[in-house]
Each structure stands twice: as C-alpha cells, then as structure tokens.
Amino acid sequence: MAVWIDGKALAAGIKAQVREEAAALPLRPVLAVVLVGEDPASQIYVRGKERDCAECGIRSLAHRLPADTRQEDLMALIQALNNDPAADGILVQLPLPRGLDQRPVLEAIRPDKDVDCFHPLNVGKMTLGREGFRPCTPAGVMEMLKAYDIPVQGKRCVVIGRSSLVGQPLASLLTQADGTVTLCHSRTENLAEHTRQADILVSAVGRPGLVTGDMVKEGAAVIDVAINRGEDGKLRGDVDFEAVEKKASFITPVPGGVGPMTRAMLMRSVLYAARLHQGQAV
C-alpha cells in the first residue's frame, strides 16, 4: 500500500519558512494579482492566493477588471505594475475571458516580476538550469520528491501531458535532476507501455481515471497533478486512486497533494522577487 504524499503538510512548512524570511526583509513583499472577468473558479483561486499571502506576511494587491476589458487597457495595467516599485511580483489569473490574447499579456510582464515563470527569458533560464524563477507546479512536484526521498537520478520518469505550464517544464527539471524522461501526450501510441516502465509517473492531463492500476509499475511513485470535478461535485485527479494505491510506493491524493504545493511555491517565488528588488542575497 502506497505512502500518501501530504502536500498540505509540506506546503504549510514552506509557507512558515517564507513568513519567517519575509519578516526579516527591510520591506514587506508585495504580489499584484490581476483578475479579469467573473469566472467562478478564478475567483476562488484568487481568494486562495490572497489567504496564502496573508499567511506568509506578503501584501496582496488585487486588480479586478470587467470581462469586457480591452486588450490595450490590460496591457497598460501590466506596464503600470512593471513600473510600480512596490510590486515585487505580478500574477495574471488564467484563463482570460474570450477576446483577450494571453500570450502578449504574459510576455509583457517584466522578467524580474514574473513569479509564474511564463516569460520566455525565464523559461529559457529554467531550461538551461540557471538561477531564477521556476514554474510553480513543476517546482512543487520536485519539492515533493525531495521531501519524501524519492530518487530521480537514473530513474525512468514518465510525464503524461506536454503543456507549457506543467508537462514540458517538469520534464526539463526531471532531466536536470538526472532522470531518464519520457514525455507522453494525446498522440502517444501505446501509452501504457511507457507508463508501466516508470519509476516516477506524473499525470497532468485533466482526464479522470486516465491512469489505471494495470498501467503502473509495482513500487512506482505516482504524482497526480490534475484536478477534475466530477458530476457528483467531488474532486478527482487523472489517477484511479484506489487501484493505483495498491501498487505504488508513493502517491499524491487529490485534493491535498500537488495543489497546496503549487500555491506554496508561488509564495516562495514572491519572496525570491522581493529579495531581488531589495538587493538581498538569493
């Protein structure tokens, strides 16, 4: 029976450390959050980030804009936040309403305030293993593996999902940790043949029940990044938890696994940005 990887407990420890280090800075770190429209899920996510900021001693500045905001007005807000010395980090809540192009918005964020690590400069630095920001969810996954002493070096790592938010950057981080990585996606043939070889299996697709028990190697560590809401209102991941738990050595629950770690790593990124801006060693 697999050991549950407790993302909530790990996240609480990281946030406590961020709170302690933030309190030692000359100025309180500040995160500017931009929310466009009234999407209910986005509203919940933003409120959660505001609570995290309060826990960590970070000031949260929310900029809420109507759904019919024009592209040029959103770009002007980003530029104003870029020029605001009080804003250490800028986070644009995704998805944006229809009619707004998110790519130029994200690429307009100044690289030293890009706490989500979306800017091409930061993505390139991350890919090269340079010092800098890391995408929050992939960084959270790596932190979980480290915390539970799950070795990556020399291990077969299979990532299902090639998104630029999770799959691709996580594959890069696992490779930098000397894992042997296979990145699978919707056009991968014979997916189970790949997953059954994985010592570390990560699924980040958004398809409930995608990973079944017969797709998992005995003793594998299974990380479920996805969060799907079923017809019954319950949250589920990509992994058939009951079946896979019997074969895996480690497994992340949904909820309570990767999600809290993503938010904690965001807080760490804001602290990193504040250190940069205040001339503190990082």
Image (cartoon, rainbow, N blue to C red):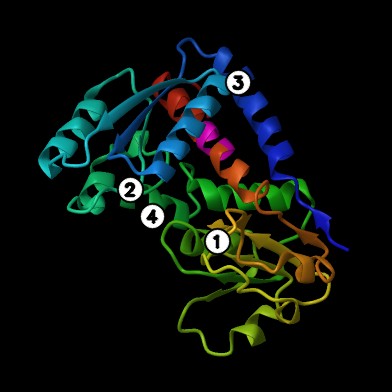
Query: Are the residues at dot 2 and dot 4 in contact (C-beta closer than 8 Å)?
Result: no
Q: Secondary structure at mark 3?
A: helix
Q: Which mark is residue 19?
A: 3
- Which secondary structure is most common in the magenta stretch? helix
The amino acid at mark 2 is His
Query: Are the residues at dot 3 and dot 4 in contact (C-beta closer than 8 Å)?
Result: no
**Image: magenta residue range:** 264-268
* Precedes in sequence: disc 4 or disc 1: 4
Mark 2 crowd level (few <14, some 14–19, many ≥20, 10 Å Cα): many
> Where is residue 277 shown, x and y percent of the image?
39, 23
Q: Which mark is residue 124?
A: 4
Mark 2, residue position: 119
Q: Secondary structure at mark 2?
A: loop
> Where is residue 190 shown, x and y percent of the image?
58, 89
Above or below, 174 against 69 in this view is below
Q: CA distance from mark 3 to mark 1?
A: 38 Å
Q: Secondary structure at mark 4?
A: helix
Camera-side residue: 121 or 252? 252
The amino acid at mark 1 is Glu
